[in-house]
Image (cartoon, grey):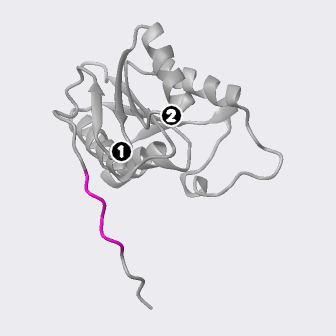
């Protein structure tokens, strides 16, 4: 039996609906191909979408935290206690550790996240197969990848506003 391929999914915490839909499709495709998934512990954006997709599919995955901090999945949406604020360097160290664990990496980028750009640059420098998908504000993707997880970029129309039920 061959060894599993590990793929890191990383991206912007300020993600648009199109970015989140793309993330779901890419993660589902990776799971279908037998990849093992590595992701960060951010309770927003791309990281959370990766976690939710793996969880709903029943796929085991590795969540890498800042400074080795353990966070149960049920606590991802809760704020950390006062005084536990992490620095940009803490997150950069976490991102480098995730890249070092992976055979390949896919970055879903909003065009402004410095952390996503830095992690991608580190992956390229380390010789990891690094794939960047950049979304503009209109939700259109520019793909810089040879990875066959998603055959073509997608555009997701915004959902109509939902009325609250009382």
Q: Among all residues in the image, which is located at the extreme front?
A: 138
Q: Callout 1: 10 Å neighbours few (<14), some, many (20+)? A: many
Q: Judging from the image, what secondary structure is the residue with disc 2 in?
A: loop
Q: Which residues are magenta?
A: 156-161
Q: How many marks?
A: 2
Could you tell me which secondary element the residue under label 1 belongs to?
helix
Q: Nearer the viewer, mark 1 or mark 2?
A: 2
As drawn, 34 above or below 83: above
- Left or right? Give the position of 83 relative to 105: right
Query: For the residues marked 1 and 2, what is the alpha-carbon distance in whole angstroms?
Result: 13 Å
Q: Position of residue 63 (x, y in %)?
A: 51, 38
Quarter in which the N terminus is drawn: top left
Name the side, left or right, on which 76 lies relative to 20.
Answer: right
Q: Is residue 55 above or below residue 147?
A: below
Left or right? Give the position of 14 relative to 23. Answer: right
* Residue in view at x 46 percent, y 21 percent: 120
- In depth, the one of 47 and 101 nearer the eye is 47
User: Residue at 47% across / 8% down in the picture?
Assistant: 125
* Residue 157 in magenta stretch: yes
Seen in the picture, residue 47 relative to 7 is either above or below; the reply is below
Instruction: From the image, tell me which residue sits under label 2.
Output: 112
Q: Quadrant of residue 142?
A: top left
Give coordinates of residue 2: x percent, y percent.
25, 18
Q: Residue at x 31, y 24 (%)?
A: 4
Per the image, the residue denoted by label 1 is: 19
């Amino acid at each position: 039996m061959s060894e599993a391929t590990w793929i890191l999914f990383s991206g912007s915490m300020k993600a648009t609906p199109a970015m989140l839909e793309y993330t779901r499709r890419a993660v589902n495709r990776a799971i279908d191909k037998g990849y093992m998934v590595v992701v960060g512990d951010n309770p927003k954006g791309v990281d959370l979408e990766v976690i939710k997709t793996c969880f709903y599919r029943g796929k085991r995955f590795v969540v890498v935290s800042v400074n080795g901090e353990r966070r149960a999945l049920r606590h991802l949406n809760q704020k950390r206690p006062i005084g536990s604020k992490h620095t940009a360097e803490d997150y950069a160290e976490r991102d480098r550790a995730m890249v070092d664990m992976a055979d390949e990496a896919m970055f879903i980028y909003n065009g402004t996240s410095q952390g996503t750009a830095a992690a991608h640059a580190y992956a390229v420098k380390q010789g990891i197969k690094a794939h960047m998908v950049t979304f503009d504000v209109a939700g259109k993707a520019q793909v810089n990848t040879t990875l066959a997880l998603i055959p073509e970029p997608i555009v997701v129309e915004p959902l109509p506003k939902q009325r609250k039920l009382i």
